[in-house]
Image (cartoon, helix red, strand yellow):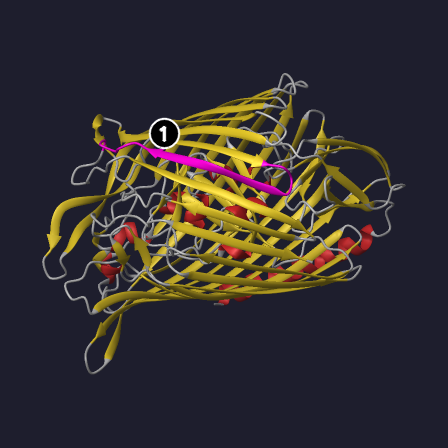
C-alpha cells in the first residue's frame, strides 16, 4: 500500500500541475468549438457520431446527446467531416468563432460510414492501418444483451466463449482470455474476466454509450494482453462533454428466454464549468431455456451504479468518476447431486479520473488517466438439504489494481505527427478458499512508447512505433500453496513495435497494412494452477516454466465504398512463439470427476480472413453478407490443431428503414468444426434465423426488438465451455429494449 500511496500523491501533484497550466491557457485567444449532431428527418440527436477537423487532423466522438466539443481551437476557417453509422458523411465549412454553437444535420444512408476509432490511434486521426469497428448507442441498443460477449458476437471476426449468459466474453480471431484486452474508458479494468471462462466482465452493458473494437495486435499502445486485439468500452460515468441544464435517460431491457428484466436510470446536470452525472442499473434473470428445457444454475442478478463530476476551464478539462457492481450468477456445471450448485458472487468498486490539456506549444495536447479498482469474487458451493441450505467458499479472489497512462501529442513536424506515451500498472492478487487455484501474486509494469505518422503524399501515410516495458511479478504463499521454494519471481524487459501503411487513392478506395511484434506474459493461473476448478469445469494444471509469448502479426485490408455499395476484405496471419494452449489431457481427476486441462507451450500459427459487403437497393432497403474464418495449428505440424478455434461463419441480413420504422431478417450459418485438438470434441454446423425491428418515436424515445433462434434450433457452439458437451445453446428468444432520453 505504500507504493499506492506514493503514486496517488504523484497523481495529485500532476493533476494540480495540469490545472495550473489550464489556468495559464486562459490568457490565450483560443476558444472551444462546440456543436451538436442531429438527424435531418426529425431533429433527434445522433449519439456517437464522429467529427473530424481536416486542417488540424483532430477528431472527437459525440456523446449520448449528440454533443461534441474541441478544446482550445484558434479562430479561423475549418472544414469538418461528420460521420455516423446509418448516415451519409457530411462536410461543413465553418468560421470559428463567428458561428458559435454549431448544429450539424446528417442525412440517413443505409450504408455504414467510416469513422474515427480513438482506440487505434493516440493522435485522433481517422486513418486505419488494421481493421477496426465502432458501435454507437443505437447499435448497442439493437444488440442489447446481459454480457459483452453476447452483445458483440457476430461482428466481423468476433465470436464469444459461452459459459452461460453472465461470463460470456468476446473472442477475436480465435484469441481468447488474456490475449484480448477489454478496457473501460481507455484503461485496464482490473477484473479477472481474462483469466478463466467462469469470470465475467465487471461492467453491465446498459452502462455503455460506445464500444470500439480493434482486431489484431495492439501491444504497441497497450502492452501485454493485446496480442489478439482490444475492446474499449465507453461509459458516461465521467462527464466529458455537456450542455447547461438537466438531462436524463431511462431504459428497460427484457428477454423471454431467461425471463430477464433490466432497467437503467441516469441523470446529468451541467453548468458552464461543472457537470455531474449519476446512474443505477438493476438486472435479474432466471435460468437459460434451451430446446431441451432449462439449463440449471444459469440465473443472474446484479445491481450496478456509477457517477462522476466534470470540470472545465479554458483549454483544461478534468473529471473523476466512481462506479461499482454487485453481481451474482450461477454456472451450468454437471454435478453428481442435483441438490448441489455453484454460484459466483462478485463485487467491484472502480475509481477513474481523466484530465486533458490543449496548448499552443510543441506538445499541443496532454491526456492523463488514472484508474483504481478493488475487485473480489467468491465461488460458492451450495448444498440444498431437506433441513437446511449450506454454503462453502471453494475459491476466493481479491485483486487491487492501480494504473495510469500519460499521452503527450506533439504538433506536426514537417510530415511527422505523433505522440509519446507512458503507462504504469500495479496489482495485488490474493487467492483463498478450500480449492485455491494458485499462490498469491503481486507485481507491476512501467512502459513507454513512441508513435509517429508520416504523410508521404495525399494518398499514402505511414505509421511507425516502438514500445519498451519492464515488468516484475512476485509470487507469495497462501494456505494451499505454503512452499515458497516452488515459486520463482519473474522480471522481463520487453520490446514491441509496429509499422503500417494506409493508401487512399480516392474517396472510394482505401487500403491498409500493418506488421507488428507483440507479446504476452503468462498469467499466474497459467504458471502455478494445480487444483480442481469446479466453477470452470476442469482440473487446471499450470506450468511454471512457461516463457513469454512473442508474435509477429500481419494485417491487411482493402475497402471500396460508394453511396450504394461497400465491401471490405481483411486478411491476417500470426506466428507466435511459446503460445500457451489450455489443452484437455483426456484424463479425469477421480476425486472431483473433473477433466484435466493443462497449460502447454507451443509454437503456433493463426491466420484467416473477414469479408463483408453491404448494398443499398433503394432509399429504404439494404442488405449485407459477411464471412469470417480462422485457422490455428502448431507451426511444426498442420494437423496438430489449437483448442477452441471458431469455425467458418456466414452472416446474411436485410433491412427496411424509412427513418422511423426498421425491420428485417438475418441468417447465421456456422460450419461444422472438425479441425480440433487432441481430446477436443468436434461440433456440427448449424443455421440460425433471426429478425430485428424497431421504431423511433421521436423526442428521444426508441424501441428495439430482436428475435434470436426463431426456429428454436438445437445446436452446439464450438466455443461453449459448459462441462456437459451435449447441453444445447439457448433456444428461441425475444429481446425488447425501450430507451428514452430527455
Residue closest to the eye, 406 or 328: 328
Please give left or right for residue 598 compared with residue 649 in the image.
left
Please give left or right for residue 73 compared with residue 158 in the image.
right
The stretch drawn in magenta includes residue 45: no
> Residue shown at 19%/45% (left/top)?
584
How crowded pointer 1 is (Cα within 10 Å; few <14, some 14-19, many 20+) is rated as many
Residue closest to the eye, 433 or 5: 433
- Residue 11 location, quadrant: bottom right
Residue closest to the eye, 404 or 169: 169
> Residue shown at 43%/51% (left/top)?
734
> Residue shown at 46%/30% (left/top)?
516
- Residue 650: x, y in percent? 38, 30
- Residue 630 location, quadrant: top left
Above or below residue 319? Residue 220 is above
Above or below residue 225? Residue 113 is above
Please give left or right for residue 198 compared with residue 307 in the image.
left
Tag count: 1
Q: Residue furthest left?
A: 590
Above or below residue 302? Residue 223 is above
Check the picture and name the quadrant holding the C terminus: bottom right
Q: Which residues are magenta?
A: 657-675
Q: Residue furthest right?
A: 98
- Residue 484: x, y in percent? 25, 62
> The residue tagged with tag 1: helix, strand or loop?
strand
> Residue shown at 59%/55% (left/top)?
739
Q: Which residue is mark 1?
A: 629
- Residue 699: x, y in percent? 70, 53
- Residue 397: x, y in percent? 35, 64
Q: Can the viewer see residue 203?
A: no
Q: Residue furthest bottom?
A: 387
Q: Can the viewer see residue 529?
A: yes
Amino acid at each position: 500500500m505504500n507504493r499506492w500511496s506514493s503514486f496517488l500523491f504523484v497523481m495529485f501533484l500532476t493533476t494540480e500541475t495540469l490545472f495550473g497550466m489550464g489556468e495559464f491557457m486562459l490568457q490565450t485567444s483560443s476558444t472551444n468549438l462546440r456543436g451538436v449532431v442531429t438527424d435531418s428527418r426529425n431533429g433527434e440527436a445522433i449519439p456517437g457520431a464522429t467529427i473530424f477537423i481536416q486542417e488540424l487532423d483532430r477528431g472527437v466522438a459525440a456523446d449520448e446527446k449528440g454533443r461534441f466539443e474541441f478544446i482550445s481551437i484558434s479562430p479561423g476557417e475549418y472544414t469538418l467531416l461528420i460521420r455516423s453509422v446509418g448516415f451519409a458523411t457530411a462536410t461543413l465549412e465553418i468560421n470559428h468563432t463567428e458561428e458559435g454553437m454549431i448544429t450539424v444535420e446528417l442525412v440517413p444512408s443505409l450504408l455504414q460510414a467510416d469513422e474515427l476509432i480513438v482506440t487505434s490511434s493516440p493522435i485522433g486521426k481517422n486513418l486505419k492501418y488494421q481493421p477496426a469497428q465502432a458501435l454507437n448507442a443505437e447499435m448497442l441498443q439493437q444488440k442489447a444483451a446481459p454480457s459483452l460477449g453476447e452483445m458483440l458476437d457476430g461482428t466481423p471476426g468476433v465470436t464469444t466463449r459461452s459459459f452461460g449468459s453472465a461470463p460470456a466474453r468476446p473472442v477475436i480471431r480465435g484469441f481468447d482470455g488474456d490475449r484480448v484486452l477489454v478496457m473501460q474508458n481507455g484503461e485496464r479494468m482490473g477484473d479477472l474476466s481474462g483469466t478463466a471462462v467462469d469470470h465475467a466482465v465487471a461492467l453491465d452493458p446498459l452502462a455503455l454509450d460506445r464500444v470500439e473494437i480493434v482486431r489484431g495486435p495492439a501491444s504497441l499502445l497497450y502492452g501485454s494482453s493485446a496480442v489478439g486485439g482490444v475492446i474499449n468500452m465507453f461509459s458516461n460515468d465521467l462527464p466529458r462533454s455537456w450542455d447547461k441544464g438537466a438531462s436524463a435517460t431511462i431504459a428497460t431491457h427484457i428477454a423471454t428466454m431467461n425471463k430477464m428484466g433490466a432497467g437503467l436510470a441516469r441523470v446529468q446536470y451541467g453548468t458552464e464549468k461543472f457537470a455531474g452525472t449519476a446512474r443505477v442499473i438493476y438486472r435479474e434473470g432466471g435460468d437459460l431455456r434451451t430446446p431441451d428445457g432449462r439449463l440449471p444454475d444459469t440465473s443472474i442478478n446484479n445491481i450496478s451504479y456509477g457517477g462522476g463530476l466534470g470540470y472545465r476551464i479554458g483549454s483544461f478539462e478534468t473529471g473523476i468518476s466512481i462506479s461499482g457492481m454487485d453481481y451474482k450468477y450461477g454456472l451450468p456445471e454437471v454435478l453428481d447431486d442435483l441438490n448441489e450448485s455453484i454460484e459466483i458472487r462478485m463485487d467491484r468498486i472502480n475509481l477513474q479520473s481523466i484530465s486533458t490539456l490543449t496548448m499552443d506549444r510543441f506538445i499541443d495536447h496532454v491526456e492523463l488517466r488514472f484508474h483504481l479498482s478493488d475487485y473480489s469474487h467468491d465461488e460458492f458451493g451450495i448444498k440444498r438439504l431437506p433441513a437446511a441450505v449450506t454454503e462453502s467458499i471453494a475459491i476466493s479472489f481479491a485483486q487491487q489494481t492501480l494504473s495510469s497512462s500519460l499521452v503527450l501529442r506533439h504538433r506536426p513536424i514537417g510530415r511527422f505527427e505523433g505522440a509519446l506515451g507512458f503507462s504504469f500498472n500495479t496489482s495485488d492478487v490474493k487467492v483463498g478458499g478450500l480449492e485455491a487455484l494458485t499462490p498469491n501474486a503481486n507485481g507491476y509494469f512501467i512502459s513507454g512508447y513512441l508513435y509517429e505518422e508520416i504523410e508521404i503524399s495525399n494518398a499514402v501515410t505511414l505509421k511507425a512505433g516502438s514500445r519498451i516495458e519492464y515488468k516484475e511479478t512476485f509470487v507469495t504463499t497462501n494456505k494451499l500453496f505454503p512452499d515458497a521454494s516452488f515459486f520463482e519471481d519473474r522480471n522481463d524487459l520487453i520490446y514491441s513495435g509496429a509499422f503500417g501503411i494506409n493508401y487512399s487513392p480516392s474517396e472510394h478506395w482505401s487500403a491498409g497494412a500493418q506488421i507488428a511484434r507483440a507479446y504476452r506474459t503468462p498469467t499466474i493461473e497459467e504458471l502455478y494452477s494445480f487444483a480442481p476448478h469446479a466453477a470452470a469445469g476442469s482440473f487446471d494444471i499450470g506450468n511454471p516454466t512457461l516463457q513469454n509469448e512473442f508474435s509477429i502479426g500481419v494485417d491487411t485490408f482493402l475497402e471500396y465504398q460508394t453511396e450504394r455499395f461497400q465491401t471490405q476484405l481483411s486478411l491476417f496471419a500470426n506466428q507466435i512463439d511459446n503460445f500457451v494452449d489450455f489443452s484437455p489431457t483426456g484424463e479425469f481427476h477421480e476425486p472431483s470427476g473433473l477433466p484435466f486441462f493443462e497449460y502447454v507451450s507451443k509454437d503456433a500459427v493463426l491466420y484467416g480472413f473477414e469479408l463483408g459487403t453491404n448494398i443499398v437497393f433503394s432509399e429504404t432497403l439494404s442488405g449485407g453478407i459477411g464471412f469470417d474464418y480462422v485457422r490455428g495449428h502448431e507451426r511444426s505440424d498442420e494437423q496438430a490443431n489449437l483448442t477452441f478455434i471458431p469455425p467458418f461463419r456466414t452472416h446474411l441480413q436485410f433491412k427496411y428503414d424509412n427513418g422511423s420504422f426498421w425491420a428485417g431478417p438475418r441468417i447465421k450459418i456456422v460450419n461444422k468444426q472438425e479441425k480440433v485438438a487432441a481430446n477436443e470434441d468436434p461440433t456440427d454446423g448449424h443455421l440460425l434465423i433471426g429478425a430485428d425491428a424497431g421504431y423511433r418515436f421521436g423526442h428521444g424515445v426508441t424501441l428495439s426488438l430482436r428475435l434470436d433462434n426463431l426456429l428454436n434450433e438445437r445446436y452446439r457452439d464450438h466455443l461453449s465451455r459448459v462441462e456437459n458437451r451435449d447441453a444445447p445453446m439457448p433456444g428461441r428468444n425475444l429481446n425488447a429494449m425501450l430507451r428514452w432520453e430527455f
